[in-house]
Image (cartoon, helix red, strand yellow):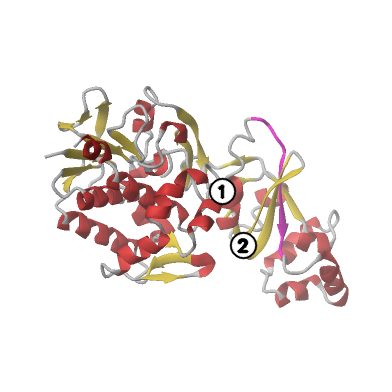
Amino acid sequence: MKNIVICGAGPAGCMAAISAKTHFPESNVILIDQNDHILKKLRLSGGGRCNVSANVSVQTIIEQTPRNGRFLYASLNEFNSTHIQDFFTSRGCPLIEEDHQRLFPKSHKAADIALVMLNELHRLNVELQLNIYVNQIDLHNNRVITSDQTFNYDHLIIASGGLSYQQTGSDGHLIKILSQHVEVEACYPAETPLVSNDALIQSKLLQGVSLKDVSLTLLIDGKKKKQVKHDMLFTHFGFSGPGVLQLSSVCRDCFEKKQSILMIIDCLPHLNHQEVESLIKEKTLSKVLSMHQLPKRLNEAYDVLKENITPTQFLKAWTFNIHDMRGFNQAFVTSGGISVKAIDPATMHLKAYPNVSVCGEMIDVHSHTGGYNISLAMSMGYHAGKHCLEASKKER
């Protein structure tokens, strides 16, 4: 009997275990995690509701993956949003679609997503080893050395996550171990809020104000780098919300290089400058804000800025300096990790160690928020599990 050992019981690791046991039912599949229950990070996602996927095509997922998206074609063609919807719906957990094609459990409970996966692991007789920390991996002797015991493996799947949400156990320990054997890219926080030291932000006048479907443009050293249309939130330190998190994906090393970064907010992207100018002439700013369901507190912000900006500029090209980005403690995902150059995308095997696969956030691939990252994790996990003993099958 073959031993398939999986390190990490997040979305990638759980799906890898389910896939491995499904495709190799005679094997012994062991899933190891340091927490006392599976899917600890997933249970916190979406404010506890779990934005488990997005009802979009494979091509859209690739387009929404700014870091090495093309690496995912093989895994997404095998297991994607359609398969994720079928997986949960067929097991008694229907999903509903909300704005921006986001998919949530109909119950609005992340725990229900976790329960489906836990029940599937039990049904397939996957061996769960919880509250166990992996201290070392011996790639030459095929051993996983933990705080409790040593596990020998015929194939190892590592899905231990990146460095975000470190309170859930994602400490990057296994990335560091693998860096001794394969190429690893430096890790940065990604999909993370942006910091501004501008006086208006530091005054906290706009703290808690949210804007729906505004256009956000990021300029780096004066050049347009990225533009998105999505929601945003003013915070006590700067900006958050889905649109801002997407912009942060291109800020990876800008601050180390001391580049200048500006964010421009277009509050009325469906109107051009001339149309807004005409509206302002006909009505007061306050009435224009009300007409377009923009927060009243923007009036107070304009009162602070009016000596330096016209009402039209305020509504169409409101500009802020970006001074930093929040760290891993507030990052949704990690940018960096195991280099895609070290991995065979057709199997998820490490090229240098064909009896070892890696998947999930520990790989140098990340997507935008909105259900994409969980989709990627499950896709890579399923793919890794399905192909984990492929080399053994060929040998037979």
What is the C-alpha distance between the residues marked 2 and 1? Answer: 15 Å
Q: Specify the segment rendered in magenta.
A: 257-267
Circle on res. 193: 1
Density class for disc 2 (Cα within 10 Å; few <14, some 14-19, many ≥20) is some
The amino acid sitting under disc 1 is: Pro
Q: Is residue 46 above or below residue 89?
A: above
Q: Looking at the image, which residue is at 60% across and 59% down?
A: 232
Q: Is residue 86 left or right of residue 218?
A: left
Looking at the picture, tell me which residue is in the foreground, 28 or 96.
28
* Element marked by disc 2: loop
Looking at the picture, tell me which residue is in the foreground, 125 or 282.
125
Circle on res. 309: none
Residue 153, how many percent across, how many down? 19, 33
* Element marked by disc 1: loop
Q: Looking at the image, which residue is at 18% across and 46% down?
A: 128
Q: Please say whether residue 171 is one of the residues in the magenta stretch.
A: no
Q: Earlier in the sequence, mark 2 or mark 1?
A: 1
Q: Can the viewer see residue 162 in this picture?
A: no
Residue 106, how many percent across, how many down? 36, 71
Residue 131: name its quadrant: top left
Residue 303: name its quadrant: bottom right
Residue 395: name its quadrant: top left
The amino acid sitting under disc 2 is: Val
Q: Please say whether residue 259 is one of the residues in the magenta stretch.
A: yes
Mark 2 vs mark 1, foreground winner is 1
Q: Looking at the image, which residue is at 16% across and 38% down?
A: 3
Q: Is residue 307 left or right of residue 243?
A: right
Q: Looking at the image, which residue is at 85% across and 60% down?
A: 310
Rendered-image quadrant of the N terminus: top left
- Residue with the mark numbered 2: 209
